[in-house]
Image (cartoon, coloured by chain):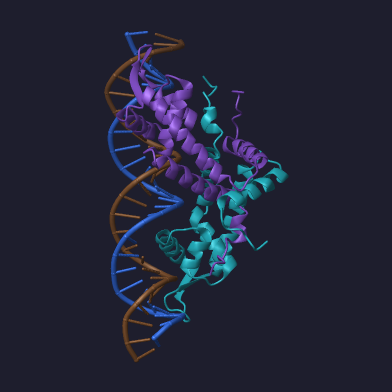
Chain colours: A purple, B cyan, C blue, D brown
Amino acid sequence: MAETPYVPTRIRALPSWLLGRAAARGHRLVADALAREGMRMMHHAVLSAVAELGPVSQADLGRSLSIDPKDMVMIVNDLVAEELVTRAPDPRDRRKNAVTISPAGTRTLRRTQKLGDAANAELTAALSPAERDQLIDLLTRIAAPGLDDRCT
Amino acid sequence: MAETPYVPTRIRALPSWLLGRAAARGHRLVADALAREGMRMMHHAVLSAVAELGPVSQADLGRSLSIDPKDMVMIVNDLVAEELVTRAPDPRDRRKNAVTISPAGTRTLRRTQKLGDAANAELTAALSPAERDQLIDLLTRIAAPGLDDRCT
DNA sequence: CCAAGACGTTGGGTGCCCCAACGATAGCGC
DNA sequence: GCGCTATCGTTGGGGCACCCAACGTCTTGG
């Protein structure tokens, strides 16, 4: 019974289905890896974004990462509770909360980034480096349809 | 302000992140398309699998599509309620429920398959046919890590 | 000064995934 | 024949990601 009665070809050939399966595996691998540091995927992503963008509002973070404002509130709450970031009102726009990474956050981020990279390496273990780059290229063009990245 | 402050490079380069974003978009496109027939993604997948595999037990369906038995119960319940499939005890193994597609199910499947294909075409609109095939190949190898398909 | 809009926050809702348990049934060794 | 083990369908609970709607606070532009 080792031979799994495999995925019907009709469904298997659908990019949407494959994306779902691959994303599920990726999520599982990364989440399990980060769990060893008590970190969750979204929290790691936000922490990484804060580190790159510097003091930034929650709304900007949400737009950058496509995270719902509702979820962002709780993620930042958690990160603040763990003292990985600080949340202070922006003096120039008192509606905004300037989120800034802390030294402890920087240290944690260094560890979680290693774990995340390792998990992604395992995820793409079946691919050559060139194929991995191509996958990233294809996915980038699929994930953001109308929006071209202008960050160069 | 129209220029979105875009995804931090650190996160954007992670296959796991891109897979999540791309899968979310694919799910949204396909789900919206199928909703016009009152069908959900998983239901469509199960219906399609039943059509291909013929009378099949729920457990086999679950293994084929990586669907949790718990969800499978409700999916089949829904499909039975809509009279798209029939669920009858297998005389050869009375533990099993033989799920079979009905004529109405076949007709519905024809329509939903068109909708699903169209949604997938939109999903991969930014890709050339060759790139689309390559994406499918890469995703297939990523989604199923240890399991090689021998049905080639 | 007032209307429009953005920001953070709270609330509710859906879909997919995973784990644990249970009665009923089948296959196996003895 | 008789346990033992395993599978099947089913039920239950929980977590995470995603989405929509509303509200008070605050900024901005007319």
Answer above or below: position of A52 versus B14.
above
Q: Is residue D20 left or right of residue A140?
A: left
Displayed quadrant of residue D17:
top left
Answer above or below: position of B101 versus B30.
below
Displayed quadrant of residue B89:
bottom left
Residue nearest the observer in this picture, A140 or A94: A140
**Which residue is located at x 51 percent, y 61 percent?**
B46
Q: Percent x, y for residue A151?
A: 59, 23
Answer above or below: position of B55 versus A9.
below
Q: Percent x, y for residue B94?
A: 43, 78
Q: Percent x, y for residue B43?
A: 49, 58
Q: Is residue D3 left or right of residue B30?
A: left
Q: Is residue B131 left or right of residue A110?
A: right
Residue B20 seen in this snapshot? no
Q: Is residue B146 left or right of residue B135?
A: left
Residue nearest the observer in this picture, A42 or C11: A42
**Which residue is located at x 33 percent, y 19 percent?**
A88
**Which residue is located at x 55 percent, y 38 percent?**
B18
**Which residue is located at x 49 percent, y 28 percent?**
A64
Residue nearest the observer in this picture, A131 or C4: A131
The quadrant the C terminus of chain A occupies is: top right
Residue A109 seen in this snapshot? yes
How many numbered discs, if any?
0
Q: Percent x, y for residue A11?
A: 59, 57
